[in-house]
Image: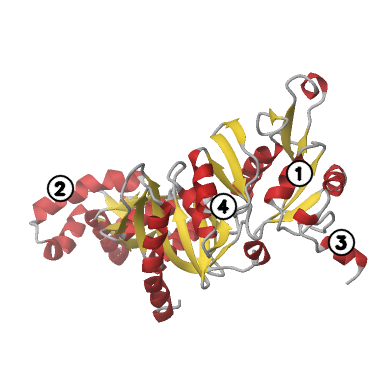
Amino acid sequence: MSHWCRVEGLLVEPMGHLWAAFSPATGETVLLNDESASILEVLEEKGVADTAEISASLVVDSGLDVDALAAIVESAWPRLAEAGLVREQPIRHAIA
Amino acid sequence: MTADEARLSRPLGEVQIAELTQALAGNGLWIDFGAAIVRVQSDCAVFAAQLRTVYGQFPFADQSEWADLHVRIRRPRGLRRWVRPQVKFQYDSQQPFEPFPADSPLPLFEWGCNWLIGRRLNDVLLLHAGVVEKGGLALLLPATPGSGKSTLTAALSQRGWRLLSDEFGAFDPEAGTFRAVLKPIALKNRSIDVIRRFAPQAVLGREFPKTRKGTVAHLAPQRDAVERRHEGARPGAIVLPRWEAGSPTRFEPLTDNSVFPALAFNAFNYSLLGAVGFQAAVRLVRQCPAWRLVYSDLDDALIAIETVWPQVVERRRASPK
């Protein structure tokens, strides 16, 4: 399973019922929903995490079961990566 | 005051056309917009009179030590000097646009300067917005072309609000204030007559038909706005205007997530400023209450704004940072 981390210098701010995120990697700003912002928040705490770890962290707050959450988190990675908000960590770094 | 100081302290509107023409043909004319100074030279005979009308309250300066922008409005050589004559805009020896008809140097100058300011003024977050001020607080009017931003900005400037800019919301992230980029307001098509009726005392330049934006006429900034063009304004409120024919006035509060894109994704240099631009846009959204204003009647629109303005002032008084 892939491990992910936030890009360095990422800025995330609540913006009404959405979130605004600025990626220094791409220089672009995107608006995020709560699910994406939650993933980034957990990554900020953990540094590096995979889908299972993120889902486990969010299960209490979300009220969803862990499988449903895992599907949401897994589907979010490509969009977050494309927006320059997260990057995949080589596995040796994740273990270290 | 020395004779030279007296000569230079005159408003441009009081300078003889011959003297202006001579300055333009010589060292040039320095016009201080507030956040930027332009030096303009020209060999175009009608340009002096057009400038004098709409920059009439600006101080006359035919010498200075500094200019941010150096531009020339020139008549081309060759056949175009005589057959359907034209004028061209040059900066740093480059000519970025197609020439305009020879009788239209002012719209070319205005358009070219705006284009240059949009590319060069990168020590501020340059929002595409009108800005007016009252009581030290700025009212920001971000909008897309055709939304009625210029008409509303012009109307406010004629009813006790100080004009900072019709085109550029120049937010200085370090100072936390808007800076003036004070230039004449380019009114287009029906807006020209709307403002003539709304403010018969307003000084408008001649109409230029058949520009890319239709007929354009420029509204001259008033003396107070010119005299205070180096005075900033703290963020006060944001109003997103939209003119709709026949619409009753609607004034609705906006959520932060509606306002943020209207600022950040409608700015000239947001991407260029990177994190600084992001943080500045976030700060403005946090500090300023925002509304959407749909209008067709200018008087009604101004009443709507004036009605909420005491709330804006009170909010800033309670939370000055």
Residue displayed at 86% across by 61% down = B7
CA distance separating discs 1 and 3: 19 Å
Secondary structure state at the residue bearing disc 2: helix
Q: Chain of mark 2?
A: A
- Distance in Å between CA atoms under marks 4 and 2: 65 Å
The numbered dot on residue A71 is 2
**Which numbered dot is residue B7?**
3
Q: Which label sits in the foreground, 1 or 4?
A: 4
| Residue B264 seen from this side | yes
| Quadrant location, the N terminus of chain B | bottom right
The residue tagged with tag 1: helix, strand or loop?
Answer: helix
Spot occupied by residue B318 in the image (x, y as percentages of width and height): 39, 80
Q: Are marks 4 and 2 on the same chain?
A: no
Q: Earlier in the sequence, mark 1 or mark 4?
A: 1
Rendering coords of residue B247 (x, y %): 32, 46
- Circle 4 marks a residue in which chain? B
Q: Amino acid at mark 1?
A: Ala
Mark 1 and mark 4 residues within 8 Å of each other at the beta carbon: no
Q: Which mark is residue B49?
A: 1
Q: Secondary structure at mark 3?
A: helix
